[in-house]
Image: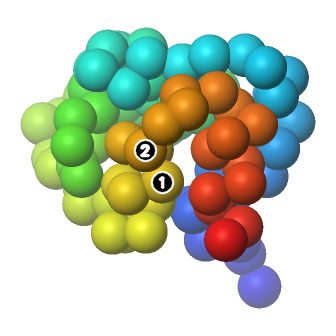
Amino acid sequence: MAKSLQQQFADWVARQPAEREYDYGDICGCAFHEFLVDAGFPVETVGGDNWKNQSGVLHRLPEALATALVKKPWTFGGLADRLVA
């Protein structure tokens, strides 16, 4: 069975340096945007609990994922811990 987008993201986050920071407020540079680009998704922006693809279609993030992204510290190690909690 294929992994969910949330599990793919958690796996990707776990491979990032734990001390590396991300900017939650940067719609084109937040952790989830970086993941989508690396994974080959046609992402335009990420904001709040949605991401928009290059065709303008909005995709809603699971609540647990959106909550994990917004909480501090904005480091990949902190995010990895929140994603498995």
Q: Residue furthest front?
A: 73
Q: How is the image coloured?
A: rainbow
Q: Viewed as shown, does residue 11 lie left or right of 79?
A: right
The residue shown at (73%, 16%) is 20
Q: Which mark is residue 43?
A: none
Q: Is residue 58 above or below residue 30?
A: below
**Which x, y percent locates residue 14?**
82, 44
Verify CB contact (< 8 Å) between mark 2 and mark 1.
Answer: yes
Instruction: Identify the residue shown where x is 71% and y is 67%.
Output: 84
Residue carrying label 2? 71
SS at circle 2? loop
The image quadrant that residue 60 belongs to is bottom left
Q: Between 50 and 85, which is closer to the camera in this rendering?
A: 85
Look at label 2 and name its amino acid: Lys
Looking at the image, residue 61 sits to the left or right of residue 78; the answer is left
Q: Does residue 83 sit above or below 38 in this rendering?
A: below
x and y percent of residue 26 in the render? 32, 15
Indicate the amino acid at tag 1: Ala
Residue at the spot 36% in from the left edge and 55% down from the top edge? 66
Residue beneath label 1, please?
68
Q: CA distance from mark 2 to mark 1?
A: 6 Å
Q: Is residue 34 above or below residue 83?
A: above
- For the C terminus, the image quarter is bottom right
